[in-house]
């Protein structure tokens, strides 16, 4: 038996759940460079769920796209965080639905008894801190992939 590879997924939609810090590192790498309008964030306090509709860059397909000379792709994905107790934000304009945010990473700071804080690190020194009772984050693709509007892969300074 061999480990699964990115290529094995083909065109199948991504659905991944993080229940511990190691899982979250993998999930974070898959949502890196996602963009979303500020209006696409929802906190359902009675359900204790925070969700964001992301335009996710398909990192799992980027090498194959480049090798085959085809367009890089994005896909709309829902990022859902469960067991939310409290949310704080910094550097995130409120009430401006036209503001587009760029997700750089998802970080985890564990506290006592499995509780902790999930931080959505945004470009431009923005952050959304989400206190949770337990770590449970899900990313699920909800549309078919589409050609990335820029036609390029995101680049980062080293």
Image: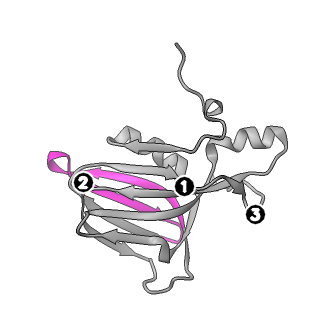
Q: Distance between the residues labelled 1 and 2?
A: 28 Å
The part of the chain drawn in magenta is 102-125
Image location (x, y in percent) of residue 84: 26, 61
Image location (x, y in percent) of residue 74: 66, 55
Per the rendering, the mark at residue 53 is none
Check the image and name the residue furthest to the bottom. 95
Q: Which of the 4 image quadrants contains residue 94? A: bottom left
Q: Residue at x 48, y 55 (%)?
A: 105
Question: As rendered, which of 40 and 33 lies closer to the eye?
Answer: 40
Q: Which residue is drawn at 72% across and 39% down?
A: 63
Question: As rendered, which of 16 and 92 lies closer to the eye?
Answer: 16
Per the rendering, the mark at residue 116 is 2
Precedes in sequence: disc 3 or disc 2: 2
Q: Which of the 4 image quadrants contains residue 154? A: bottom right
Image location (x, y in percent) of residue 75: 62, 55
Q: Distance between the residues labelled 1 and 3?
A: 21 Å
Indicate whether residue 155 is drawn in magenta: no
Precedes in sequence: disc 1 or disc 2: 2
Viewer-nearest of discs 3 and 2: 3
Q: Residue at x 32, y 42 (%)?
A: 19
Query: In this rendering, is residue 33 above or below 92?
Result: above
Mark 3 and 2 residues: CB-CB less than 8 Å, in contact? no
Per the rendering, the mark at residue 142 is 1
Query: In this rendering, is residue 22 above or below 44?
Result: above
Q: Is mark 3 on a helix, strand or loop?
A: loop
Per the rendering, the mark at residue 150 is 3
Question: As rendered, which of 148 and 130 lies closer to the eye?
Answer: 148
Viewer-nearest of discs 1 and 3: 1
Image location (x, y in percent) of residue 85: 22, 64
Q: What element carries label 2?
A: strand
Predominant secondary structure, magenta span: strand
């Amino acid at each position: 038996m061999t480990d699964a590879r990115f290529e094995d997924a083909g065109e199948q939609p991504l659905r991944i759940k993080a229940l511990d810090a190691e899982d979250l590192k993998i999930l974070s790498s898959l949502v890196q460079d996602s963009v979303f309008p500020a209006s696409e964030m929802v906190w359902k306090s009675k359900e204790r769920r925070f969700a964001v509709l992301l335009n996710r860059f398909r990192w799992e397909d980027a090498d194959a796209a480049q090798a085959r000379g085809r367009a890089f792709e994005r896909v709309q994905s829902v990022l859902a965080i469960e067991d939310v107790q409290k949310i704080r934000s910094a550097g995130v304009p409120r009430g401006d639905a036209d503001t587009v945010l760029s997700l750089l990473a998802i970080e985890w700071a564990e506290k006592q008894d499995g509780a902790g804080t999930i931080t959505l690190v945004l470009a431009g020194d923005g952050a959304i801190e989400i206190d949770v009772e337990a770590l449970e984050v899900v990313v699920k693709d909800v549309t078919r992939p589409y050609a990335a509007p820029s036609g390029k892969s995101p680049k980062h300074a080293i």
